[in-house]
Amino acid sequence: REFERQLKLAFERGEFELHYQPQFSIGERRLIGAEALMRWRHPERGLLAPAAFIEILGKKPSAAAVGEWALRTACQQAVRWRDSVPGFRISVNLFEAQLRAGTLLSVVRRALADTTLAPSALELELVENILIRDDPSTLRLLRELRNLGVGLAFDDYGTGFASLSLLKRYPVSRLKIDRSFVREAARNPADAAVVRAIVYLGRSFGLEVIAEGVESEAQLAFLVENQCAEAQGYLFGRPLPADEFTQRFITAG
Ligand code: G
Ligand code: G
Ligand code: NA
Ligand code: MN
């Protein structure tokens, strides 16, 4: 409770910020977009990663306001980058509370209209476990978002429950292969099999597939060999504040 109050105050004081991690097409080794990742610039404890607060924040109704701020901020930033990067797309993570709030569709519409970002330049990331409660209103909401032209990605794909039935029913456009599979894929046959299976699923369902947590050339070589088209991870770049992202990936070319 006390921590919740602190989070609310921190948000009101403007202590939350977004960092951006690049996403690359593997074939061309070209920047194709970025994932917006939240950080808390704590006055005493320094920069905090979401692990320290997302779990507590994520299910509270107040998370919807934080999520809306993140969405608008990320869309605004994407508009600054889009002219330099053909097809640039920004990915934003959703809190469970945003799906339950009943306002997500209008919030997304407004964020796009106010920033002039094209719907196809926005992707929303969901972890599968948000969906296993599986109410019809969530399914309807996701269809409406897809009808707007916004992308939907399954985050940490392969680690949740009921992956295949969700894939069949939910209108997702991209799978993000969880980094726990990518880490050992070049060495461990079981992880290799999971990565290959997800790439194959993506192809079968007509979805884009991106590998998360790519840290080494060996991992990248494995992905090339297995025809995974896109990658994100420390090999390409860590999450950076917007101005550093611009210096490193936009103006440096
Ligand atoms: O940035 P980092 O790797 O520490 O992120 C850890 C987790 O926090 C990830 O699962 C990520 O999806 C989640 N996360 C980061 N930023 C956001 C955000 O803006 N909204 C939501 N809902 N989750 C986020
Ligand atoms: O749950 P989600 O996939 O959104 O989490 C993204 C998190 O993964 C971020 O906190 C980010 O800092 C972290 N991350 C991004 N790339 C790498 C990587 O190459 N290796 C590791 N270990 N973590 C990464
Ligand atoms: Na994510
Ligand atoms: Mn992920």
Image: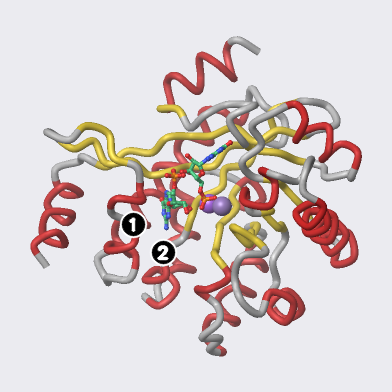
Relative vertical location of residue 246 with respect to residue 221 in this rendering, above or below: above
Q: Is residue 185 left or right of residue 160?
A: right
Asked whether the viewer can see residue 156, the reply is yes
Q: Is residue 71 visible?
A: no
Q: Residue at x 75, y 54 (%)?
A: 191
The residue where tag 1 is placed is 54
Q: Position of residue 88 (x, y in %)?
A: 65, 36
Q: Is mark 2 within 8 Å of ligand 1?
A: yes
What residue would you read off at disc 2? Answer: 95
In the rendering, at what x and y percent does residue 108 appear? 48, 59
At x 72% / y 60%, what residue is drawn? Answer: 173
Q: What label does residue 213 carry, if any?
A: none
Q: Position of residue 177 (x, y in %)?
A: 69, 53
Q: Residue at x 53, y 36 (%)?
A: 78
- Dot 1 or dot 2, earlier in sequence: 1
Dot 2, how many residues are within 10 Å of its Cα: few (below 14), some (14-19), or many (20+)?
A: many
Q: Quick one: label 1, few (<14), some, or many (20+) residues within 10 Å?
A: some
Q: As shown in the figure, which amino acid type bears the numbered disc 1?
A: Ile
Query: Split into 4 quadrants, where in the image is the N terminus?
Result: bottom left
Q: Secondary structure at mark 2?
A: loop
Is label 1 in contact with label 2 (beta carbons under 8 Å)? yes
Is residue 23 positioned above or below 185 on the image?
A: above
